[in-house]
Amino acid sequence: MTFKQISVSTAVDATKKKMAGSRRKSSHCSGAREKEYIIRVQRGISMENSWQIVRRYSDFDLLNSSLQISALSLPLPPKKLIGNMDREFIAERQKGLQNYLNVITTNHILSNCELVKKFLDPNNYSVNYTEIALQHVSMFFRSEPKWEVVEPLKDIGWRIRKRYFLMKSKNQPKERLMLSWADFGPDKYLSDKDFQCAVKLLPSCSHPYIYKVTFATGNESSALVIRPFNEKGTLKDLIYKAKPKDPFLKKYCNPKKIQGLELQQIKTFGRQILEVLKFLHEKGFPYGHLHSSNVMLDGDTCRLLDLENSLLGLPSFYRSYFSQFRKINTLEGVDVHCFGHLLYEMTYGRPPDSIPVDGFPPAPSASVVAVLESLLSCEALKNGMPAVSKILQMSLFSDILLTNSEKPQFKIPTKLKEALKTAKECIEKRLTEEQKLIHQHRRLTRAQSHHGSEEEKKKRKILARKKSKLTAFESGEEHLAKYSNSNNSAGSGASSPLTSPSSPTPPSTAGVSTIPPPPPPPAAPPLPPQMDGAVHPDPSPADSASREALLSSIQNFQKGALKKADTCDYSVPRIS
């Protein structure tokens, strides 16, 4: 199960939680009033796959106490007995609990542990898988009475639905064996018949770098595998200097001393792991589950574990990492990318803080950094993973000679090969679809974040103002031009006052006073330009005809054609 955070975007593989609100409720155990917080949880990138849970501070405190086995310093807000119902305190406590959840769910190991998943998703993780595993093991013992359970190996692995038991054979009571049981995962595509056939083939697989399987069987819902128990533990136990029987959180969350392996160990172990990956790829057997806990250490030899995981369809330990990169879309590419994680862990004694890795710390050799850059750098993740054969040719591994003389042998029937090939294609198809959805969600989130940024808001405001001013200016010019054209067409003949030719200037009379003519009427003020965008109707046809006749008569006027007229001017006063 993968959670995604609401407040922080990474994540590659994280939880969406928001302290959305709170309400008061009386505590039945102590009689004191205790606040309840509503937590919104979302699995993956789909908003539809979300739910709400209600938790009190005491629930957080209980979870934190259970996680103390990891030896991590987690930022749970401290208790407060007095004044714990104040509004300001509750708001501050709400932020602190949100930060606490963020820290837990961005830690790759903590976010996958059963305690955290039960806290955030109690409906889907309320089952006791140890009891279920014991029921299946008991049913198996009815048909195979030669095996006996010594003790359960509690929480030694990271998978919730996978359980381990220390076993012994009645024929060889001193020999210790380890039984692992797991049910089907989301990538189980083999038919029940092909699945049981493939599981029963595992004991027949012989390779110097594959850990021997003593017995394996499967049914319609799960599989059971028995192997020799190794007291020295896995490659991860060597790196972290841990005891194999300790819980996973205690062994690997916060190691006391961080120290990588020696250069010769890195070269030898890396070459052995690459050789077995090449063998499985050539056989067409899907793996996809490489990490340091799946590499058993037998002296100076590394042996691969859990070949049954891909048959069961279980998710990879590093799925939340490689599902972010669309170029890692085959199981061969997944194995190579996971080898990059493993090589980093062998070199520096701890996993990388984030993927891609921007800069690598000093390493025992420059050739180590060269391999890591080809697997974990930003450029490598954009271009895709190299083939295993190409990595074997790099200087870090090319000079290592493997002296093991055991001949690899793993015979797979032709029909089963075809079934495995089809199952592999289905696994890769589901991975590609998941990567596509994550890519689309990331682009959408990035666009929304950019669109909602303060800088982008200011830019949009400035552009809107400029656009508004430009629109108003263009509109004003357009209407001004319309008004000017209208005036020119309507009043071109009356733009200047006309002098009537039939009214000659009266002769002046010397020494006689005259009465000046009345002043002309004041001219009408010009009309203001129309800025409201109104459309004025064209003049009627009758008005146009009369205007044209008037203009024609004015243009054709001839002064010589006028008749002389005798006028009697009675305007001058006469003195008798």
Image (spheres, rainbow, N blue to C red):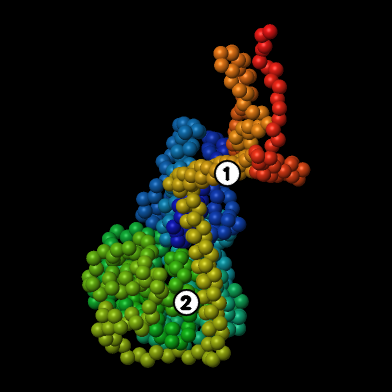
- Residue that appears at 69% across and 37% down: 562
- Residue that appears at 59% across and 13% down: 513
Q: Earlier in the sequence, mark 2 or mark 1?
A: 2
Q: Quadrant of residue 221?
A: bottom right
Residue 26 relative to residue 284: left or right: right
Q: Residue furthest front?
A: 576
Is residue 284 something one can see in this rendering?
yes
Is residue 532 something one can see in this rendering?
no
**Residue bearing the label numbered 2:** 330
- Residue that appears at 42% across and 90% down: 409
Residue 487 coordinates in the image, percent (x, y): 62, 40
Residue 423 relative to residue 541: left or right: left
Q: Height in image: 545 above or below 196?
A: above
Residue 152 coordinates in the image, percent (x, y): 47, 67
Closer mark to the observer between disc 2 and disc 1: 1
Residue 400 coordinates in the image, percent (x, y): 26, 83
Instruction: Give the spatial CA distance, label 2 vs label 1.
Output: 68 Å
Q: Quadrant of residue 475?
A: top right
Pick the residue in front: 496 or 526: 496
- Residue that appears at 57% across and 38% down: 23
Pick the residue in front: 162 or 228: 162
Tag shown at residue 481: 1
Pick the residue in front: 448 or 418: 448
How busy is the neighbourhood of tag 1: few (under 14 within 10 Å), some, or many (20 plus)?
A: few
